[in-house]
Image (cartoon, rainbow, N blue to C red):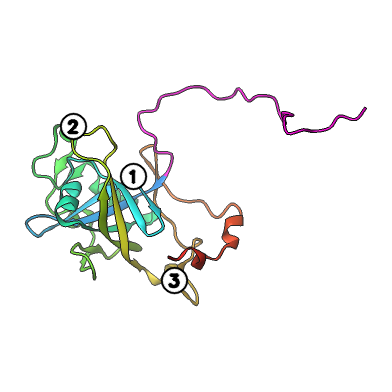
Amino acid sequence: MTDTLTDQTPLTAPDTRHVVTNPAILYFGTPVVLVSTRNADGTANLAPFSSAFWLGDRAVLGASHGSQTYGNLRRTGQAVIALPSSDQADVVNRLALTTGNPSPAAYKLARGYAHVADKFARAGLTQVPAELVDAPIPAETPIALEAEVVAFHSEPGSDGAPVTELRVVRVHVHPELLLPGRPNRIDPDRWRPLIMSFQQLYGLTPRVASSRLASIDEEAYRR
């Protein structure tokens, strides 16, 4: 008698290669961004973030409650989220372990952070005025997103992750990243984001395969 394959038939034996672990952080790989905000004295703050992702026109940031960026977002509700390329790791490293807060939180001091007032100068970046928000654009970063706060999804003192949701209101891109003849399409073969994976900085490899999802035109997602 010929055996038949049913929905209940296991295709392979159970996989026992996994082990249980408990990492202190879960940074499996996200783009690094530089968040520009306006300080209360009118100067600019610029801070690197490795907790950032996008859903439609919404940007989601993990900004710690004691950070200068979080305080500025609370006060102004505006920011520029800039994306450095993979060849700008030195810019991010110049900003690492710095804070715009003149009175850093104890946990930051314990981790080696120091106050730096002029973050743009420290990074070696040029301030360019944004068009819709009161925060400067770093001219040298290939992509910059003007954004306005939509919601804070946790409060200081709460147990929740410090998540801030923003709406992207304008996108600025270096023109060489655009698909020829398509002014609203970024060419993924030209854009090379800087990726953080478990505290280390990486770039993307060349495309490994064509995506089936890419058969859907990007314009189908426009709201």
Tell me, yes or no, if residue 211 can be seen here: no
Q: Residues within 10 Å of mark 2 (few under 14, many from 20)?
A: few
Q: Disc count in the image?
A: 3
Residue pushed farthest right?
A: 1
Residue at x 22%, y 34% (from the top left corner): 158
The answer for how far apart the CA atoms under marks 1 and 2 are is: 18 Å
The answer for how far apart the CA atoms under marks 3 and 1 are is: 26 Å
What residue is pinned by disc 2?
107
Residue at x 44%, y 57% (from the top left corner): 192
Tell me which amino acid carries mark 1. Answer: Ser
The region drawn magenta spans 1-29
* Rendering coords of residue 123 (x, y %): 23, 54
Q: Nearer the viewer, residue 142 or 52?
A: 52
Tell me which amino acid carries mark 3. Answer: Asn
Give above or below for 151 relative to 13: below
- The quadrant in which the C terminus is found is bottom left
Counting residues from the start of the chain, the first of labels 2 and 3 encountered is 2
Residue at x 48%, y 63% (from the top left corner): 221
What residue is pinned by disc 1?
51
What residue is pinned by disc 3?
184
Q: Nearer the viewer, residue 184 or 136?
A: 184
- The quadrant in which the N terminus is found is top right
